[in-house]
Image (tube, grey):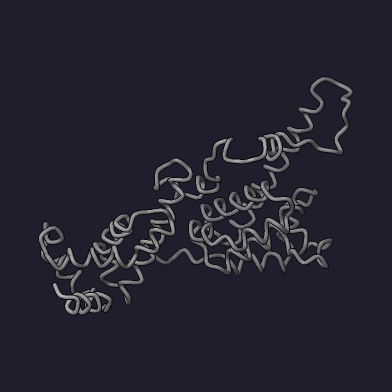
Amino acid sequence: MTQSSSREQRDRFEDSEALRSLLTRLHEAGRGAWRDDPEAAALMRHAAEKYAALARKHGLDPWEAASAAFEAMRGAATRRADDPWAVVTRAVQVTCIGEERGNGLLCSVHQARRPRYSVFHDAERFSDRENPLPDYHPAFRIDPFADDQSDAPGEDDELLLERTMNVASAVEDTIAFFCLLGWAPDIARGTVEYVTGRLTESVSRASAFETLRRDRQARALLDLPSTSWTTMLRVVLGNPDPALAHTNVGRGLLVRLLIGEPLRALLRDDDLVLTAGLAAPDVRGDRL
């Protein structure tokens, strides 16, 4: 095949209507069409070239991206879409992110796509860091305001257990708050658990807010629109503006629950309820 004809074929594949026609023809041809049709082979070579940069960005081989494109192209939703290439590209992007997270978490791609698993950080060896484990792991942190002397055996353990239970209760109330305002339970739980997980690794709520706000990979894994993601962060962690630090807007939902405000009182906060309710993602549309 000459360079000119190769370029013509590539330009033809990039046309959405031409792609739709080819996918429809391969679908109607039945079993074996993708394996035996020379145009199908050329299409997959084009997909490997098209998504090579995206694959390398996530540490994958271009043909792994082409494989994800192949799976998307076989779906009826792709043939019926206004822009088939947009559907294929999104499917490849989600698959690449899932593959990268699966490799980092040492689990399957199927698990890595689920919010309950994606909240964890990538596996790492103790030797991967220059600093010793006690310098950075929260399990070895000491509360400088804690009393060194306990009046009774086990008192420190009881205090630690009480704090842990309070945090867990606040997280569950936060999830319930969003569910009551129209957020799908799985989305609310996955997002809140991800945010609180990252909060434990940050030096402050403001730092966690800024880090999470720029975390596009997390938003893609949780499948949240940008507006819903940013609003969720602002509601849960509070507005990071220093001028609002001592207001309810600045404290955020999680802190207000931890300092003793009951969930029923928060549900009477009209501004908070309206903000969280309007940001609820629309789950009626089809998802990849």
**Residue 271 locus on image (x, y percent):** 72, 68
Q: Is residue 111 left or right of residue 199?
A: left
Whether residue 56 is situated above or below residue 82 in the rendered picture: above
Q: Closest to the observer: 260 or 147?
A: 147
In percent of the image, x 63 and y 50: which residue is there? 198
**Residue 203 locus on image (x, y percent):** 73, 50
Q: Is residue 282 left or right of residue 209?
A: left
Q: Residue furthest top?
A: 153
**Residue 230 locus on image (x, y percent):** 62, 65
In percent of the image, x 13 and y 72: which residue is there? 1
Q: Closest to the observer: 220 or 140?
A: 140
Q: Closest to the observer: 136 or 168?
A: 136
Whether residue 271 is situated above or below residue 65 in the rendered picture: below
**Residue 192 locus on image (x, y percent):** 61, 52
Whether residue 21 is situated above or below residue 107 in the rendered picture: below
Quadrant location of the C terminus in the rendered image? bottom left
Q: Quadrant of residue 77?
A: bottom left
Q: Is residue 269 left or right of residue 224?
A: right
Q: Is residue 130 left or right of residue 101?
A: right
Q: Quadrant of residue 10?
A: bottom left
Q: Quadrant of residue 229?
A: bottom right
Q: Closest to the observer: 128 or 214?
A: 128
In percent of the image, x 47 and y 63: which residue is there? 283
